[in-house]
């Protein structure tokens, strides 16, 4: 009697791959020693799995790649900006939309504009830059 095998496949096609640096333990020890055991001083080319950041952790879909190729990169008033602003406004209802390149930059803007000395900001503390952004405005 044969047992049926269930095949589980991903419901997508992978469009791109990127080679990862694979270092040996001894290579990593040397690299860390050269960086004084400070992972911020490591070159990204020497990091196989980045547990420090949440940036770049997902593959882009074919529609995202297409949008990237079709995007209008002119600065103010571009079609891309108007579409982004309209979509964010429809989803959130926010009057003002300030795009940022990453979450840390958004935190810095929020901290600088909303916090006052003496405010307490509870957070998960995963990113040292979050604390730096809050300390920058003297909120803690």
Image (cartoon, rainbow, N blue to C red):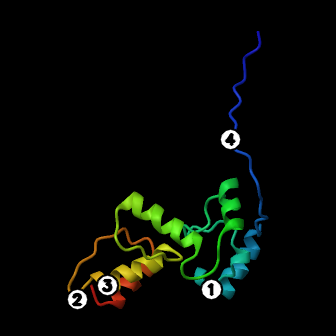
Label whose residue precedes the other's in the sequence (1 or 3): 1
- How busy is the neighbourhood of tag 3: few (under 14 within 10 Å), some, or many (20 plus)? few
Q: CA distance from mark 1 to mark 2?
A: 32 Å
> In the rendered view of the protein, which quadrant contains the N terminus?
top right
Q: Nearer the viewer, residue 130 or 106?
A: 106
Label whose residue precedes the other's in the sequence (3 or 4): 4
Q: CA distance from mark 2 to mark 3?
A: 12 Å
Is 58 situated left or right of 85 in this image?
right
Image quadrant assignment for residue 20: bottom right
Q: CA distance from mark 4 to mark 1?
A: 36 Å
> In the rendered view of the protein, which quadrant contains the C terminus?
bottom left
Q: Residue at x 62, y 68 (%)?
A: 50
**Does 93 sit above or below residue 125?**
above
- Element under disc 4: loop
Q: Nearer the viewer, residue 2 or 13?
A: 13
Label whose residue precedes the other's in the sequence (4 or 2): 4
Q: CA distance from mark 3 to mark 4?
A: 43 Å
Image quadrant assignment for residue 41: bottom right
Label whose residue precedes the other's in the sequence (4 or 1): 4
Q: Residue at x 77, y 58 (%)?
A: 16
Percent position (x, y) of residue 3?
A: 73, 16
Residue under pointer 4? 10
Image quadrant assignment for residue 106: bottom left
Q: Residue at x 76, y 75 (%)?
A: 27
Q: Is residue 38 visible?
A: no
Residue under pointer 3? 113
Which is in the foreground here, disc 1 or disc 2? 2
**Does 62 sit above or below residue 25?**
above
Numbered circle sitting on residue 117: 2
Numbered circle sitting on residue 41: 1
Is 50 situated left or right of 22 in this image?
left
């Amino acid at each position: 009697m044969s047992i049926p095998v269930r095949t589980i496949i991903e419901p997508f096609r992978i469009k791109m791959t990127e080679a990862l640096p694979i270092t040996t333990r001894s290579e990593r020890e040397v690299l860390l020693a050269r960086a004084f055991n400070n992972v911020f001083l490591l070159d990204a080319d020497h990091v196989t799995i980045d547990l420090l950041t949440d940036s770049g952790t997902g593959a882009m879909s074919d529609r995202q790649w297409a949008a990237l190729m079709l995007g209008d990169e002119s600065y103010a008033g571009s079609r891309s900006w108007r579409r982004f602003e309209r979509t964010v406004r429809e989803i959130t209802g926010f009057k003002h939309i300030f795009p940022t390149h990453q979450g840390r930059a958004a935190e810095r803007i929020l901290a600088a504009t909303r916090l006052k000395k003496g405010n307490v900001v509870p957070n998960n503390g995963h990113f040292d830059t979050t604390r730096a952004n809050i300390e920058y405005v003297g909120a803690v």
